[in-house]
Image (cartoon, grey):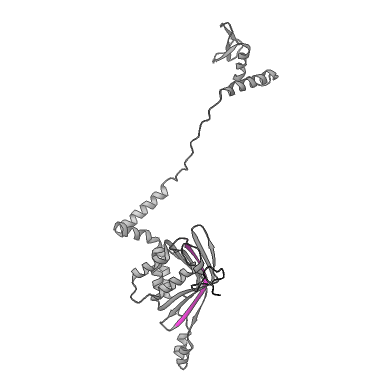
């Protein structure tokens, strides 16, 4: 009985990515396989336009590439932006490399809303060197990739942490120069440092200076300004950002609550009852004078700086139900 694609135990000849339901019909690891094939199609005549097209196909516009390793003088960490990534890959081949590919083993994938993260603890970068001698270099480490979860599935962040490397020389070459101690001594020397050529290391050191200058280069390319004018403009804008006051958070307009008319009278009545029952130790509040309305009298407080008969600063005038005014001290 032949298996069909509808069979749950069907194994596709194209690999497990054939049955994956994602916008891009392959696994993220397959993108590395495609990148290896594109690197193999490189020729000696590949110019900067070819490398820009290569970076555009596999890296996002705001992508970053980070390399971490340890040299004789201590640990190193280099991070370059999207505009410097094409030149990084080209320097690998300028250092005598004829072939470059990546091998991912036992990688783990994690899915997010807009990205896919691939964490491979057993990644190997394999480079084939044709000069100064025929050597195969295997650089092992941990590779963490973040892909965008869309139809293009391009790399947003690339972080390769190098742990160790090995340089392999064919036995046939050793047998050919077995009687020549000088050649054997040359073959015993390493041609890379932590799996990276001197061309690549020098470029990474140069990127420490080039990366902060990307704003100047972009402004020069966009506005066709001189380098001095670009520097003045960038410094002025940076100074404006430093002296500008921080933006205040927008405050929500406070809505005024409408007061109920009954609340004033009820409050006055309750306060009047409490003041009537009090022992007189507390001072009378203006609301206590309004309690006369319950007895048919309306009190109008009238305060002045001149003391009254008994030395009080305030006296009140009461209105009787008959309409006559009566002064109270």
Q: Looking at the rendering, in which quadrant would you find the C terminus?
A: top right
Task: From the viewer's side, name the closer residue of 239 and 21.
Answer: 21
Residue 108 versus residue 315 in the image, above or below: below
Residue 244 versus residue 226 in the image, above or below: above
- Which residue is at the far front? 1
Can residue 229 be seen from the camera position used here?
yes
Q: Is residue 324 magenta?
A: no
Q: Which residues are magenta?
A: 135-149
Q: Is residue 282 left or right of residue 126?
A: right
Report the predominant secondary structure element of the magenta stretch: strand
The residue depicted at 45 percent of the width and 75 percent of the height is 101
Residue 220 locus on image (x, y percent): 32, 59
Can residue 196 be seen from the camera position used here?
no
Q: How many marks?
A: 0
Residue 62 versus residue 183 in the image, above or below: above
Q: Looking at the rendering, in which quadrant would you find the N terminus?
A: bottom right
- Which residue is at the far bottom? 179
Where residue 57 sits, quadrant-wise, is bottom left
Task: From the viewer's side, name the closer residue of 322 and 203.
Answer: 322
The residue depicted at 50 percent of the width and 70 percent of the height is 69
Residue 27 locus on image (x, y percent): 49, 67
Q: Is residue 270 left or right of residue 218?
A: right
Residue 285 locus on image (x, y percent): 61, 20
Task: From the viewer's side, name the closer residue of 291 and 108.
Answer: 108
Residue 169 locus on image (x, y percent): 48, 84
Q: Is residue 202 left or right of residue 274?
A: left
Q: Is residue 146 magenta?
A: yes
Task: From the viewer's side, name the closer residue of 27 and 169.
Answer: 27
């Amino acid at each position: 009985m032949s298996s069909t694609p509808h069979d749950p135990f069907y194994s596709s000849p194209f690999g497990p990515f054939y049955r994956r339901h994602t916008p891009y019909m392959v696994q993220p690891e397959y993108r590395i396989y495609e990148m290896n094939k594109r690197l193999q199609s490189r020729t000696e005549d590949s110019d900067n336009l070819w490398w820009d097209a290569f970076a555009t196909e596999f890296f996002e516009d705001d992508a970053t590439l980070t390399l971490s390793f340890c040299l004789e003088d201590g640990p190193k960490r280099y991070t370059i932006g999207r505009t410097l990534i094409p030149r990084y890959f080209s320097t690998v081949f300028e250092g005598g490399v004829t072939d470059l590919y990546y091998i991912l083993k036992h990688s783990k994938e994690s899915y997010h809303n807009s990205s896919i993260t691939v964490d491979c603890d057993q990644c190997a970068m394999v480079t084939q060197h044709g000069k100064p001698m025929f050597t195969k270099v295997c650089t092992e480490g941990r590779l963490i990739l973040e892909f965008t979860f869309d139809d293009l599935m391009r790399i947003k962040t690339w972080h390769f942490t190098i742990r160790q490397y090995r340089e392999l020389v064919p036995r046939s070459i050793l047998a050919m120069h077995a009687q020549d101690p000088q050649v054997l001594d040359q073959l015993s020397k390493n041609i890379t440092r932590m799996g990276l050529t001197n061309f690549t290391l020098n470029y990474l050191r140069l990127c420490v200076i080039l990366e902060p200058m990307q704003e100047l280069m972009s402004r020069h390319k966009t506005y066709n300004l001189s380098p001095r004018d670009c520097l003045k403009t960038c410094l002025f804008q940076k100074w404006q950002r430093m002296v500008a006051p921080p933006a205040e958070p927008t405050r929500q307009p406070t809505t005024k609550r409408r007061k109920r008319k009954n609340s004033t009278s009820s409050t006055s009545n309750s306060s009047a009852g409490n003041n009537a029952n009090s022992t007189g130790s507390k001072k009378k509040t203006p609301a206590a004078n309004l309690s006369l309305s319950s007895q048919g009298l309306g009190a109008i407080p009238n305060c002045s700086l001149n003391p009254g008969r008994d030395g009080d600063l305030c006296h009140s005038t009461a209105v009787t139900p008959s309409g006559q005014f009566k002064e109270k001290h």
